[in-house]
Amino acid sequence: ELDDMQARGELGAFLSSVAFDETQSDPLRDVQSFLRRIGMQHAYMRVIAAFVRAGYESHTWITELEDMEKSDDLDPFVTSVVAHKDPEGEYAGRAVVDVYAFLASLGVKPAGAGTVVDEFVNAGYKPSTWLDELKEMNEVNELVDFLASTNVFIDDNPAVSALATELA
């Protein structure tokens, strides 16, 4: 099929149509930018940790912050999460960043990493276990299957991954 597309001069257009959209959401970057804009970047990790502890999915984080800003609840929220002392919760923000970095090193885009974080949160895994779980899955060659089960793919694009597999 790819040879036919190339012969018809359609392969370039196809590859362009499945290319990653650089404007795709990156919840970590978006929260960090939002907090920087309002001068609260110091609370970045704690805000992420609070959302993780509360079970919010990563695609909702910015909306939650914007809603809090509109209702004048943002300052009290940030003040409370900065003051809150919880060893597991404090690790949650760092765990999210570690998961994003590990998955990025494998070619998973930020939105895909957000989906993986959401899966761990929804399954009730403690943030301190996430990175070890992913590394273990990777070592026993189960990570690609796990990612596929969550509709996350290396390159975060199933068409590109399928194309790479077919060309190999």
Image: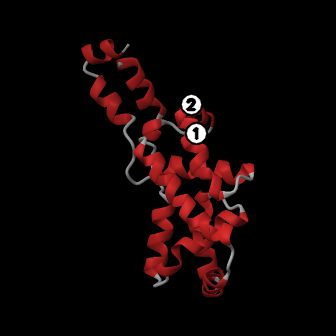
Query: Marks 2/1: CA distance?
Result: 6 Å
Element at badge 2?
A: loop
Looking at the picture, which amino acid does disc 1 mark? Answer: Glu
In the image, what residue occupies the spot 60% across and 87% down?
Answer: 75
Q: Which part of the image, by quadrant, shows the N terminus?
A: top left
Name the disc covering residue 136, or none: 1
Question: Where's residue 141, x and y in %?
Answer: 54, 29
How packed is label 2: few (under 14 Cα within 10 Å), some, or many (20 or more)?
A: few
Residue farthest toward the right in the current orientation of the protein: 124
Q: Position of residue 79 (x, y in %)?
A: 62, 86
Are dots 2 and 1 in contact, CB under 8 Å? yes
Coloring scheme used: secondary structure
Which label is found at residue 86?
A: none
Horizontally, residue 93 falls left or right of residue 87, namely: left
* Quadrant placement of the C terminus: top left
Q: Position of residue 14 (x, y in %)?
A: 35, 28
Residue 63 appears in view: no
Q: Residue at x 67, y 66 (%)?
A: 88
Q: Nearer the viewer, residue 82 or 63?
A: 82
Q: Is residue 149 above or below residue 109?
A: above
Residue drawn at point x = 65 percent, y = 63 percent: 52
Residue positioned 32% across, 12% down in the render: 4
Q: Amino acid at mark 2?
A: Val
Residue 140's mark? 2
Nearer to the camera, 39 or 2 = 39
Q: Tell me, yes or no, if residue 104 can be seen here.
A: yes
Vertical order, 133 against 70 (above or below): above
Question: Is 59 drawn above or below residue 81 in the view shown?
Answer: above
Left or right of 103? Residue 12 is left
Q: Is residue 11 above or below residue 150?
A: above
SS class, disc 1: helix
